[in-house]
Amino acid sequence: MALHLIKLCVGCESIADLTAWIAESSAARRARGIKDEHLHVTRMMPKRIEEILDGGSMYWVIKGQISARQAILDLRAVTGSDGIGRCAIVLDPNVIPVEPRPSRPFQGWRYLEPASAGRDIHAIGTFDQEMPEALRRELAQLGLL
């Protein structure tokens, strides 16, 4: 069974911000003529690599709520310009909104068991898919969604 990661999406106010940032980064990589893959570099390499690569996703916490996910395609050991080893998480550029759920702040990433991961919005029904993100967030905070 797939194991997921969860991480704060620092600097993003919404799923639209995350999607726009990914698109801008992709365009910049193509303009520079380098391989267009979406990487998120973090300090620590997960120990449970096989479980994560068995269909795991990166779940993003935006404004205090788990809001979206991206499929994890690969985990690579890389060395930064400072000589320190890091982990490059290769992510599918497709951002999938998920059922909003509160999450407290934390540093780095954490493992997220499948039972704790929210369902994709498209799996819930068309009403939630068409609902504006701000309204979905507010209803989730009130415990109504």
Image (cartoon, rainbow, N blue to C red):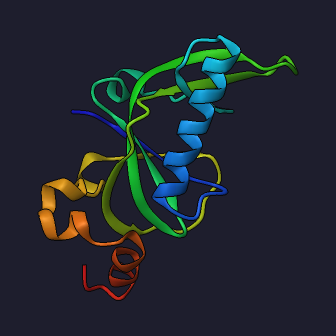
**Vertical order, 85 against 105 (above or below):** above
Q: Is residue 40 visible?
A: no
Q: Is residue 26 visible?
A: yes
- Looking at the rendered image, the quarter that the N terminus falls into is top left
Place of residue 117 in the rendered image (x, y in percent of width and height, measured from the top left): 30, 53
Place of residue 20 in the rendered image (x, y in percent of width and height, measured from the top left): 54, 47
Q: Residue furthest front?
A: 31
Place of residue 131 in the rendered image (x, y in percent of width and height, measured from the top left): 27, 72
User: In which image quadrant can residue 24 be found?
Assistant: top right
Please tell me which residue lies in front, 46 or 98: 98
- In the rendered structure, the answer to whether residue 123 lies left or right of residue 55 reads left
User: In which image quadrant can residue 42 be found?
Assistant: top right
- In the rendered structure, the answer to whether residue 18 lies left or right of residue 123 reads right
- In the rendered structure, the answer to whether residue 90 lies left or right of residue 133 reads right
Please tell me which residue lies in front, 83 or 98: 98
- In the rendered structure, the answer to whether residue 122 lies left or right of residue 16 reads left
**Vertical order, 18 against 70 (above or below):** below
